[in-house]
Structure formats: C-alpha cells, structure tokens
Amino acid sequence: MEHLVPNNLNRRSVMNVNKIYKNTLVLISIFLGYFSYAFGIELNMYYPVAVGGPLTKIVDGMVAEFEKQNPDVKVNAIYAGNYNDARIKALAALKSGKPAQLSVMFSIDIYELIEQDAIVPFDDLVNTYEEKAWLYSFYPTLMENGVTDGKVWGIPFQRSTIVMYYNKDIFRKSGLNPDQPPQNWNELVDYGKQIVSKNSNTWGVMIPSTGYPYWMFGALTMQNNQVLMNGDGNETYFNHPSVVEALQFWKDLGSKHNVMPSGTIEWGTLRKNFLEGKTAIMWHSTGNLTTVKKNAKFDFGVAMLPESKRRGTPTGGGNFYIFKQSSDEEKKASMRLIKFMTSPEQAAHWSMATGYMGVSPSSYQTEALRNYVKDFPPAVVARDQLNYATAELSTFQTGRVRKLLDDAIQSALTGNESPKQALEKAQKSAERLLRRYQ
Amino acid sequence: MNTKISHHIYGWLLVMPAVILMGTFTHLPSVTTLISSFFSNETKKRPSIFIGAENYEYMFEDPVFVEAVMNNLWYSLGTIIPSIILAIIMALFVNSKLPGKTLVRMAYFTPTILPMIAVSNLWLFFYTPDIGLLDQIGALFGLESHNWLGDTNTVLACIIVITIWKEAGFFMIFYLAALQNISPDLKEAAALEGSSKLYFFRRITFPLLMPITLFILINATLNSFKLVDHLFILTKGGPNNASNLILYYIYEVAFSFFDFSYAATITIFLLVILAIISLAQFVFFDKRIHYR
Amino acid sequence: MKDQIRIFSIETISSWFLGIIWISPLLYAFWAAFHPQEYSTNFDLTAPIVLDNFIEAWSYAPFSRYFLNTFLIVTFILLVQFVICTLAAYAFARFEFFGNKILFYLILIQLMVVPEVLIVENYKIMSQLNLVDSIIGVGLPYVASAFGIFLLRQTFKSVPKELEEAARVEGCKIFSILMRVYVPLAKPTYLAYGLVSVSYHWNNFLWPLVITNSVETRPLTVGLAIFGAPESGVNWSIISAGTLLSVSPLLLGFILFQRQFIQSFMYAGIK
C-alpha cells in the first residue's frame, strides 16, 4: 500500500483517503475478478448424439478429465439429439436461454453457420507459432469441410467415413473367401448374388437410404470419380452422367440384381439387421464399429468400400465450432477445451471407445491406439480410407439442398422416377436455390 | 345502473388474464404469421424485405408442399373414417355383456394415454423388414418380407394405421357415453318385437349416435392436421416425401431450413383449412353451443 | 347357461382379438424390456427375465431430471389453467358484460387454432419474452385453454341461480361466491378436465421439442425422442425400457383409476 500514500498528506488528506479507498476497491475487485475467473469460466457446449447411450458417457468422461486438469473451467455438455437438432438448439440458444460458447455440430453446417454470422474462424484465435501448427496437425481430408474462404472454421472431432462391414460366417457358408471382401462394384453384385442364392432369408448387401442418403450417395459418386459440389458451396453436380450412373447402380442392386431389398433401407434399424444376420454386408458409419464389435455374435470383417473407377467415401460427422457471441476469455477457454479433446491421447481414447476416427496422424502413434489396432485391425480401415476420401455434401442452404438430393435418391430407389429424371430435377431446384450465392 | 356498470367491470376483469394470454399466443401470432408471410426470410447477413406474394407463388410451385397437402388429404380420409367405424364397433362391444369387459375396454383405451413419440419406436419394430413383427408373422404364412416404411406405396398407410390405433379408443369413449343413454326400455321393446340386432342398430342406435359422430368428425379432422409426432421417429416425412404432412413440413422448413417466413406462409395455408373446418363446425354446432 | 355360450361367440372372440391387437405395442414393450437384448426380435418363451435394460436405460439418459421437468410442466399448466379458466368461465357464465359474445367466439377459435399450428410465430414470441428453454415457456401457450373455459362455463351455467342469490344475501362478495358456490359444485368438471389436461401434456411433444434446448427443461417425451432417435441405431430393448419408465406413472394411474379416467374423458367430451 506504500505507493498509495500521497506526499502531502496534511493538505489534501480527505481527498487522499478517498483515493486510497477507491484504489483498495479496485484491488479488491481485481482480486474478486481473479477469483471468479479462477472458479468461474463456464462453457456451454451443445453436442449431437443420436445415440442416447455410451457416447454421452464417453464425452462426459473426457470433459471431466479436462475439468480436472483445468479447474478454472466448468463445461456443461448439452446433448441435443441428432446433428440437425444440435444445430437448431445451439443457434436458438444464442438468441435466448443458455447461450453456448462452443459446440460440436455437423461438419457440413459451416455455410449455414457463417450465413447466420454465428461462428468465428480459428485463424483469428490462434496466435503463437505452435497454435498455428496445431491447426494443421489434422488429416487434411478431415479439414475440407471445415475450411472455406481460406479460413478454418471447424476443428474435426467426431469424424467418420463409411466402411463396409461384412459377416464372415455368411461368406464362408456361401462359399466365399471370408478374408476377401468385394473390391469393386462387379464383385459386390456377384458376391451378393452368390450369398442370396446360398442362403434363404439373407440379403447380399444393404446400403441405408433414410437418415443420410446423400452421404451414402457421396461414396458411390466418388467411386465413380465425381464429386457432388464445388469447394465454395454454391454449385452442385447432381445431373453429371457419372452421378446418374452411380444412382442407377444403387437402384439396380435392389431392383435388377436382387441382392438388396428394393425401396429405401432404414438407417436406424440396419445395424440390427446386420447383427441378426439378415444381410451379409452393410455400408455404415465407422462410428458403429465399437457397438458392432460388442454385439456381433459372429465373425465379422471391416473393409474399405469397393471401387468403380476408384475408391471413395465422403468423410462425415461433427466438428468443433466456436461462437462469435462469447467473450474473449470464453473463447480462450474454449480453445483449451478443443485442444484437449483433439489431443493425440484423447483422440485415441475416443476412437477406441466409439469407432470414430482419430483425427490426427499423431493419435495413431499413441501407444494405446497402436496396441488396439494390433489386436483389432478393422480400427484403421476408416483411417486408411481417408486417402480416397472427399468432403461431405455441404453448400449454402445446406438443409434444403441436402433434402433435394435425399428426395431424388429415395424417389429413384422406390421406383417413382428414373435416376436421371430425379437427379435432373434436384439439380434444377438446387441451381435455383444457390443462384444468389454465386 | 350501478350494478350494470360493475357487471361490465367485473366481467372484464375476470376474463382479462385469459384474454391477454390467449391474445398473445393465439390471435397475435396468427396475425404476425400473416405479416411474415409477405416478407423474405431474415438471416444475420440478409435483412428481411417486403416481397409481396412471392412466398405464396413459391409455395404453390413447391412440389414438396403440394405432396404434403395431398398426403394430408389422404391421411385425413384414411384416419377419420376407419377410426370412427372402429370406435363404434368398440363401443358396441364394450357396451354389450362381454366376458372380461373391463379388460377389453382398458385395452382399447390404453393408446390414448401413451405418448405417440414413445410408441413410434415400438411400431418401428412392427414395420421393420425381415426382423420386424409383421414380417415375422408373414413368414409364418410363407409371405415375402416387405419394406413397409421404405416403400412409397405403403408408408403413408403405415402412418395412418398408427393414428387410427391411437384415436379409435379415444373416440370409443364418446360413443360409449351415447350408447349408455339409450334407454333399456327401447331395447326390450325391440327384443319383444323380435327385430334383429342389425335392424335395431340401423334404426335406433345409429341415428342416436349421429350428433356425437359429427362432434368426433370435427375432432378427427383436426387431429389429422396436428398429429405428426410419429413422423419424427418413423419416417421424417420420407421416403421421398411420401409420408410428409403439412405440419411436419412447417416444422422442417422453420427449424431445419431456418426459413421462418416460408414456414409462416405454409402456416397461413393451414390456418385457412382450419378456418374452413371451423365454419363447418359453427354451421353444425352453433345451436348446441348456445343452448346446452 | 346363456353366458357360457357367449364366451365362444364371434362377438366375444373378435372383441378380444381387437383388444390384443390394440395393446400389442405395449405387450411388445414389456417383452423387449424384460428380456436380454438378443431376444428383442426373437420370441423365445424360455428367454430369461432380466432388469438390465432398465438399469442401462436409466443410466443412459437423465430420466429423473426429465421426470421432474414433466412433473413441473404438467403441474404448472394445470394450476394456472384452473385459475385462469375458472375466472373467465365465471365471467362468461354469470356476467353480462360489454362484448362478451364476441369475446367468447374469439376464445373458441383456439379450439381449432391449437398452439401446435402456431409453433413458428410462438417460438419468435417466446424468444422475445426471453422464455425459450424454460418450463414456463413450455406451458404458457396452453394455460388459457378455450376447452377449459368452455367446459367450466357450461358447468357454472348449470348451477341454480338461487344458490348464488342465497350466498349474496349472506353478504358474500363476488370472489367468495365463486369459491364457495361455483367451484365446489364443479368438482367433477375439474377432475375430468384435470385428467384430460394431465394426459395431454404428459404426452405432448412438438411444442416442447421446439421450445426446450437443454436437459434442465426437456420433458420426458422430448428426452425419449432423443434417447430413441433411430439415427443412433435402434436398440429396442433399451428403448422399450425407457418407454415403460416414462409412461409408467400415467399407465399405473390409469390402471388403478380406470373408471375415473374413462368417465372423465367421457364427461369432458360430452359437455
């Protein structure tokens, strides 16, 4: 307090007492401020889990670990249903209620979030060289959906690709080599036919067409060497001949080759169908891996998706975003949380617990994941497939454009329209929607 | 004079809370819905501007909207008539001397108190191809498995069945009440005259059930526009919008596409339909409301 | 003798058959919930009975919080409905005030324009009132209920005027007349309306889905929808267990007081 005592104490003592008093107050408030800082940064994080079960517990566990290491930050993970719900709820909460400072949301929500002016690019938040390097420590393919306008808006976390699960027991029973899953479209059809002919009551393959049809379709088109949209999110290629051909192939699996049920196939019940041995092959998110591993009563394998002209799959899943509306302190704390969650050790733990991918090459270098992979090779299929992966369908007006494509796919699969008709129509409507973003 | 004025004041004071609340959440939003339907959607980067009837033009050209309206029409027809017929049958069953009457009545009524959203998952099991209950039963009879919810031809019917299941027991109650009002003397007289059960139903019971049927008809029609909970779990309006309904589409446009002004436009369409039903109701029920 | 034959009549058999179809979803829920998961789609009568699914379901989602929320929402709505509808019904039944007819018709509009239809604008209003993601926000659009007002008005109208006059002679003011004469006589109406309202809001989904964001406000139905969302891969055993948990209070109440439930719905509908 020495420096607060003025020189001419006698003459202006009243004023000085006042000053001392004021300064003390300032000190106290700084102290209190520090205190509340020490105990008080609270982060709300919306998190999409379609799965009500294990996923929330795993995230809770990781968050608890983070809080232990960072006692000054409290994190409320708010589980808000599927990706769509999570986005709606997080955006809604910005306007009223309990605003979120960061969230995991669909990687393809990026344009919508930018349009709503809701998020900040990570480039604005990183300062040190080390932090900038961190931005580039993830698999580049996983960054594709998070980058636009030359800036990074989303950090990959709950990420997946589509993989092919197959039932080795059924393969054996059908006279197929259980260690040789179909490598290309023709083999897929041939194997499927053999499976169907050797087993009553079992389908050759199932590719889900509700929930996220556009995502599965992204794999087929990529295998046919064609992407669905441009990098700026304002152009789509739904009526490209290779895209039409891909949809024709999908439809033919059911209606011509009879290796798949015709009509649409329910995303949600497919896993159960596979576990019950009703289909020999399913295409599904790698996020199901751990659950399948736990529940399969038969020998199963996981393989990359087959190729037509090349291999291919879209990436999928959720990225971390930071909301613009939060304070600088909160943004800093959010960065700490995101860094923690995506650190190699945590990413490895996450990948083993769920089946989702480790988001950085270094996570696969951790001892834990290395050992896990040694015992359970399917765990790296998704990662290896990243070499052939592309971004997931994401455009401006993403919800609507997505629905256009979903509807076209379902319309073709259910036989209402030919693939060409359906896709032409979707392309035309998409062009109309995207015109003002070009 | 004095008491009259106080009557006015007391009357208004008493209704005030109800009027304010209802005004805020029924009448005001109806008006603002109309207003927003003439404006473009607002995002942070693009302010809302007056666009006249553009939303309406878009709406009538929007194939998804048209399909949702057509589906809703089928959904209404498909739910209203069967659930009324079933309700009458159930009421007749339960009103007769039936062994285990209480249990049967309970079974019919139970769906009324179960949340649609919860039972949807159970129905999902019924409809799932191959491993679902319908296909398991079908397999016993050597039937091929069918992709019930994945086929645009059957999906709406599947949704309709669930709604009928949900509603019939509820409507049964009203018929039951009406049946219990039919005097036993009438029955005895009919029995003495030796008239058949069918004849009795046609000439006596059915005419007596008519007024309540009108009431239920309105109720069922209204339900067919607001009962969409099961779509959230079962189909999300798919495949290819084959089971999309108006209210579900409103939800989708507003909370999935964030296009509030277009959602408002569709809401206006729905409000117009409801207004027409209301008019019909007033024509039929005006007297009942007044003089009961 | 006659009754014995009846057991085998077509009428009896078909009524029982229909009854079994009608509760089959519930029967299935019991089957799936009480048996190990591999039996959820296989009906093997020798399957062991287990409680694991309930334990798992309970640990997967904050059901206790959802129960509390639903309880708070239902109670809030019911209590406020009683107060508001009683006052308004009393006014419409016994006061000739300026504009009462038009007002009554305006209120009846809500019988048709139910709050579900106006989710979009009501959502905006709630966010202006800063009530998004609050229990009050879930309940508010429903508390002024045209149905409740209508029902109570009919009941109050049937109260003999002499009773009111007698009370007035005793020097009762308007409120105490309402409380001493009308409300006690309308007890069956309150019970009926209360049961209908509770079962409606216990099961309500669309509006709560729109207006709630977090676990602290989410009612059972919304929690259950998230919990059982098919995107995650359907696990019927656990979903059934969760479903049974969340419907159990209402279901139990219904089974125990079946008569009152049915009479109430009947009474409320016939008025």
Image: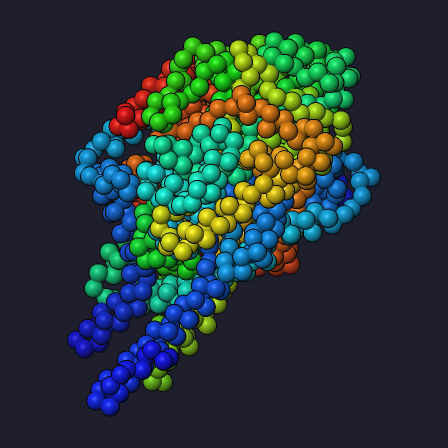
Q: Percent x, y for residue C76?
A: 45, 63
Please, which residue is most extreme toward the left here? B1
Residue C34 visible in this rendered orientation of the protein: yes
Task: Say which residue appears at 29% left-offset and 41% top-offset.
Answer: B43
Residue C91 x %, y %: 31, 67
Establish if B110 lies above or below C260. above
**Number of marks in picture:** 0
- Return the residue nearer the eye: B9 or B115: B115
Return the x and y of residue B25 as percentages of the image width and height.
Answer: 32, 54
In screen coordinates, is B187 left or right of B291?
Answer: right
Picture residue at 22% right of the left edge, 38% below the top: B38
Q: Quadrant of residue A228?
A: top left
The image shows residue A323 at horizontal and vertical percentages of: 39, 47
In the picture, measured across the screen, residue B278 lies left or right of residue A336, that is left
Image quadrant holding the N terminus of chain B, namely bottom left
Where is the C terminus of chain B found, in terms of image quarters? bottom left
Front position in the image: B53 or B138: B53
Identify the residue at the far right of this view.
Answer: C46
Q: Give the answer, above or below, for where C62 lies relative to C177.
A: above
Residue shown at the point (48%, 24%) measured from the top left = A390
Of residues A205 and C106, the one drawn nearer to the viewer in this rendering? A205
Q: Is residue C230 in view?
A: no
Residue with the most extreme front position: A7
Q: Which residue is located at x 60 percent, y 53 percent?
A: A65
